[in-house]
Image: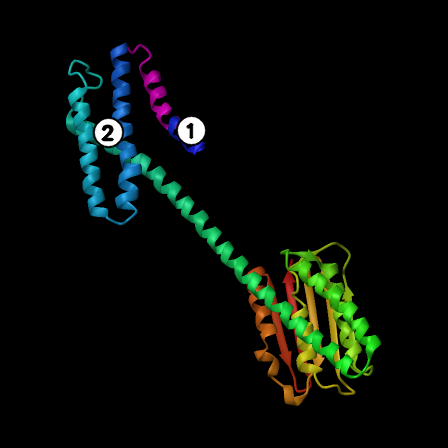
Amino acid sequence: MRLRVLYHLAFWSFFILLFWQQNPDANTRDILTWFILLGVSASVVYANLYILFPNYFFKRNYLVYLLLLVLTIGLGAFILWFIIPSANANFNLPLFQHFINLFFIVVITSSFKFFREYLRKQALLIKVENEQLKTELALLKSQVNPHFLFNTLNNLYGLITQNQNQQASDVTLKLADLMRYLLESSKTDLVNLNKEIQFIDDYLSLEKIRLSQKTDINFTVSGMNKELFVAPLLFIPLVENAFKHGLNTILADSFAHFSLSVQGNELFFEAINSVEKSTENSEKSGTGLENLKKRLQLIYPQKHQLDIEQTSNQFKVILHIQL
């Protein structure tokens, strides 16, 4: 509010200084006449900006606005023509000339109003879009947590029913660590990549407990020579997908290989897992991958690539992100 008042004062001060610059020897009558002219002009301008604009123009009553604007300017021109002394040759102008001068000032101030309104609406639009983006991201992120928790609790239930109490205890402690990370990561937009890697390691350790020792599970990391930050929980859907659709039935030759590599600001995550013929194409409808695609589109637009390849015996996903 205070800044707006300063802008208005600066605008009218410009005309006052312009008068002093062009009329250094002005007498009292000329000064008084100039302030009368500015006062009437300001009345016409503010009637347009704060009465006609909001009540008619912005409500799209354009014809009524135009008629009232012409009447307002005409009234101002008549007042100036009537009260300015005819003996004052510098300001005693024809009625039509006063109308043209007031119209010119109204056009200038209206342009400022339009520009300011445009900036305000653009800022509001950006704010709304950002709020929608945050809401959608929060919703997508929240969908990761129950999905992950459901799978892990299933693992824990299996161990308990098999009377593997020590392993169940280990899984419970590991699950507590994982859930702690899930809660922490849900409060931030970016996390340290090292924490994401540790999260995947912990998750894989839980899966190794559930699965046969013959199942080939490994995770390799390379290129981590500097600190990087990434959106949280981007890779876990790919890891979960491998176990949900590829290793849901334990076979001797089952495998799940994961790798993460960093090359400059380029990040590559690869997931390859064995696939049973009975589960072929089932992952295409998985909510985890669909969720991931939406999050990538929102967080890394034009900065990511998700490639999916499938053969009769394996499923492969490569995620490339420009950080």
Q: Earlier in the sequence, mark 1 or mark 2?
A: 1
Question: From the viewer's perspective, is residue 137 above or below residue 168?
Answer: above
Q: What's the residue type where badge 1 is placed?
A: Leu
Label 1: state its secondary structure: helix
Question: From the viewer's perspective, is residue 151 above or below residue 81?
Answer: below
**Most extreme residue toward the bottom, as rendered?**
278
**Magenta: main secondary structure:** helix
Whether residue 265 is visible, yes or no, is no
Res 285 → quadrant? bottom right
Kindly identify which residue carries mark 2: 101
Kindly identify which residue carries mark 1: 6
The N terminus appears in which quarter of the rendering? Answer: top left
What percent of the width, then of the height, locates residue 272? 70, 77
Q: Which residues are magenta?
A: 10-27
Residue 275 is one of the magenta-drawn residues: no
Label 2: state its secondary structure: helix
Q: Nearer the viewer, mark 1 or mark 2?
A: 1
Relative depth, front residue between 180 and 110: 180
Horizontal arrangement in the rendering, residue 314 relative to residue 24 (left or right): right
The C terminus appears in which quarter of the rendering? Answer: bottom right
Residue lying at 63% horizontally and 78% vertically, measured from the top left: 309
- The colour scheme applied to this rendered structure is rainbow
Horizontal arrangement in the rendering, residue 59 relative to residue 168 (left or right): left
Residue 15 is one of the magenta-drawn residues: yes
Residue lying at 81% horizontally and 71% vertically, measured from the top left: 170
Res 216 → quadrant? bottom right
Q: What's the residue type where badge 2 is placed?
A: Asn
Horizontal arrangement in the rendering, residue 69 relative to residue 186 (left or right): left
